């Protein structure tokens, strides 16, 4: 995320920032970092519309339950500018846990491209269920 840390990006007509200034002047992240592992698959078949995401500091399926329904944002860089920026986003949401090691399944509005495998994703802490 070092390349994207101080970037404003637009989605659905609103400007978002991945940092928010608190009273002391420090900046804090408003998302949990994750890594795209790949598509859900079996030995012979793969399911392109479901991606597997490993979230930071989530190591068991009980901890993954907190993130069910949370919004995911994949930020990538394009060559041409649109709406004044070269950064674009793809939005999705966490659908369920995958296995017992804290990996989650996610569905994105458009399927993630194969070049995103191993890339970073942001898990926003909304919508809240608590």
Image: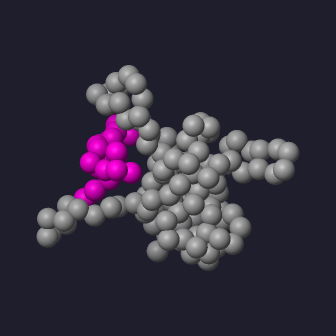
Residue 95 appears anywhere in the view: no
Indicate left or right for 22 with 36 as reference: left
Q: Position of residue 18 (x, y in %)?
A: 32, 53
**Image coords of residue 56 (percent x, y):** 49, 65
Can you say whether 26 is above or below 78 in the image?
A: below
User: Considering depth in this image, is 71 or 56 the residue closer to the camera?
Assistant: 56
Residue shown at 33% from the left, 41% from the top: 9
Above or below, comparing residue 72 to residue 116 in the picture:
below
Nearer to me, 50 or 121: 121
Q: Is residue 82 left or right of residue 70?
A: left
Q: Give the magenta range.
A: 1-20
Residue 52 shows up from this direction: yes
- Residue 19 at what x, y percent from top left? 28, 56
> Residue 85 in magenta?
no
Q: Quadrant of residue 58?
A: bottom right
- Determine if the magenta segment contains residue 5: yes
Q: Residue at x 53, y 55 (%)?
A: 35
Q: Residue at x 19, y 65 (%)?
A: 26
């Amino acid at each position: 995320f070092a390349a994207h840390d101080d970037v404003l990006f637009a989605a659905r007509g609103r400007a978002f920032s991945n940092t928010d200034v608190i009273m002391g002047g420090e900046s804090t992240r408003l998302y949990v970092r994750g890594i795209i592992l790949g598509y859900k698959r079996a030995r012979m078949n793969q399911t392109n519309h479901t991606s597997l995401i490993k979230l930071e500091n989530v190591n068991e399926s009980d901890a993954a339950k907190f993130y069910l329904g949370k919004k995911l944002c994949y930020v990538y860089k394009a060559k041409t500018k649109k709406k004044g920026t070269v950064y674009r986003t793809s939005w999705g949401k966490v659908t369920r846990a995958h296995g017992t090691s804290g990996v989650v399944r996610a569905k994105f509005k458009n399927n993630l491209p194969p070049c995103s495998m191993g890339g970073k994703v942001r898990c926003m802490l909304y919508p809240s269920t608590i």
